[in-house]
Image (cartoon, rainbow, N blue to C red):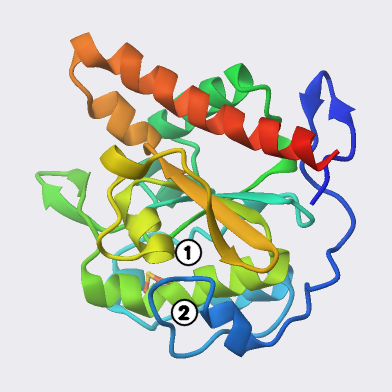
Amino acid sequence: MRATGTVRGKYRVHGPPPRTRSREHTTVQTLLAKPVTQIPDGDLATLRRKARDCHACPLWKRATQTVFGAGADDARVMLIGEQPGLQEDVQGLPFVGPAGRLLDRALDEAHLDRTTLYLTNTVKHFKYELRGKARLHKRANAAEQAACRMWLAAEVARLQPRVVALGAMAAQTLFGSTFSITRERGRWHRLGPDTEGFATWHPSAVLRTPDEQRARVYRQLVQDLSEIVKRIAADG
Ligand code: SF4
């Protein structure tokens, strides 16, 4: 996988389709640590359209819309978060709320151009509980994560990217249930012959970190994202 030049001084991380983009579903299933029962067919636009009508778990009933992945269709790096928040639910796009703004700042400091990446979530619908009129984020349970994994598996299959898991939900989906971000963040793991990835903090975890430690955790996020640039540079 190669960087293809620079955009405003930042690395571009998309390029020509890799030779292995059309690999069969059985191979794709090995890229995620957790199993999927089926992988929807189609290119990213088709998947996005199909996911609008997904009823594979109950989360669609109370959410505004499906928040599918977005970004460059030929991205060589995919950032995977956990599940949409309130702003993502309203706008239908991943990483557009407060955590998305922090991620934008971190990407900028790491010299990565967001427009060359593909950003998605492990679960594609907003889950919440009502407190008065407020819709407060609630973590998707294991069954909901399992039902939604087919969409992430399909996105990874289409792009065959380098993947960066942001937060424990994505990290454990990719690297297994025992994976610990505290112990293993920032270390590359091979996921298949042409795919590798690592995990780091979710930007919302940085926002939740107590004031006195937040700057340190944020620096770790930037440092980990910088690994992508180094890897791309090492490709030549
Ligand atoms: S959360 Fe995922 S599996 Fe559940 S309805 Fe939405 S798209 Fe389908």
**Residue at (61%, 83%) from the top-left corner?**
27
**Residue at (79%, 52%) from the top-left corner?**
1
Q: Is residue 67 left or right of residue 213?
A: right
In front of the other: 109 or 46:
109
Tell me the residue that label 1 is attached to. Answer: 66
Q: Is residue 35 left or right of residue 58?
A: right
**Residue at (83%, 64%) from the top-left corner?**
18
- Dot 1 lies on which element? loop
In front of the other: 224 or 83:
224
**N-term mark: 1 or 2:** 2
Q: Position of residue 186 (x, y in %)?
A: 46, 38
Residue type at the position of mark 2 = Cys
| Image quarter in which the C terminus is found | top right
Q: Is residue 139 left or right of residue 104?
A: left
In front of the other: 103 or 85:
103
Residue 104: quarter of image: top right
Q: Looking at the image, can residue 114 be seen?
A: no
Tell me the residue that label 2 is attached to. Answer: 54
Q: Are marks 1 and 2 in contact (CB under 8 Å)?
A: yes
Q: Position of residue 25 (x, y in %)?
A: 62, 87
Q: Position of residue 107 (x, y in %)?
A: 59, 27
Q: Mark 2 vs ligand 1: CB under 8 Å?
A: yes
Residue extending furthest left?
132
